[in-house]
Image (spheres, grey):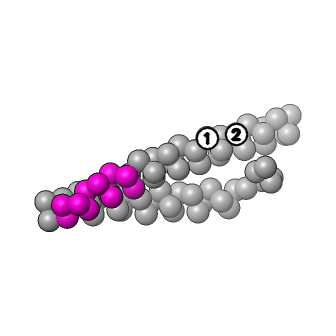
């Protein structure tokens, strides 16, 4: 029972990491595209860059909960 709970928790963390990585990639692409015209997009760029940093913080927190080798 404990092993099943741990496996479920590990799966949930893998899913969160995958979603976070996907979101961060999409945000980075948008930021890169918006940097072409930084003056017109300054406020939006700041908001998106903040979201990217928050995604990195989520990843750092999730790394503390690594229970087993992710291979």
| Mark identifier at residue 15 | 1
Locate residue 70, reporting x and y percent.
76, 51
For the stretch drawn in magenta, the main secondary structure is helix
Question: What residue do we see at 53% from left, 50% from top?
Answer: 21
Q: Give the quarter of the figure containing the N terminus.
A: top right
In the rendered structure, the answer to whether residue 52 lies left or right of residue 35 reads right
Quarter-wise, where is residue 48 in the image?
A: bottom left
Which residue reaches farthest front?
36
Residue ID for mark 2: 11
Q: Is residue 58 left or right of residue 43?
A: right
Q: Nearer the viewer, residue 4 or 60?
A: 60
Residue under the point 65% across and 44% down: 14
Nearer to us in this view, 3 or 19: 19
Q: Position of residue 63 (x, y in %)?
A: 66, 59
Q: Is residue 43 visible?
A: no
**Residue at the spot 26% in from the left edge and 62% down from the top edge:** 35
- Mark 2 element type: helix
Furthest residue to the left? 40
Q: Which residues are magenta?
A: 27-38
- Location of residue 22 with respect to 54 vertically, above or below: above
């Amino acid at each position: 029972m404990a092993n099943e709970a741990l496996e479920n928790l590990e799966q949930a963390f893998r899913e969160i990491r995958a979603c976070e990585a996907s979101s961060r990639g999409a945000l980075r692409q948008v930021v890169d595209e918006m940097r072409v015209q930084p003056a017109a997009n300054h406020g939006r760029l700041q908001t998106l860059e903040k979201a990217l940093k928050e995604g990195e913080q989520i990843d750092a927190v999730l790394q503390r909960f690594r229970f087993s080798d992710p291979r």
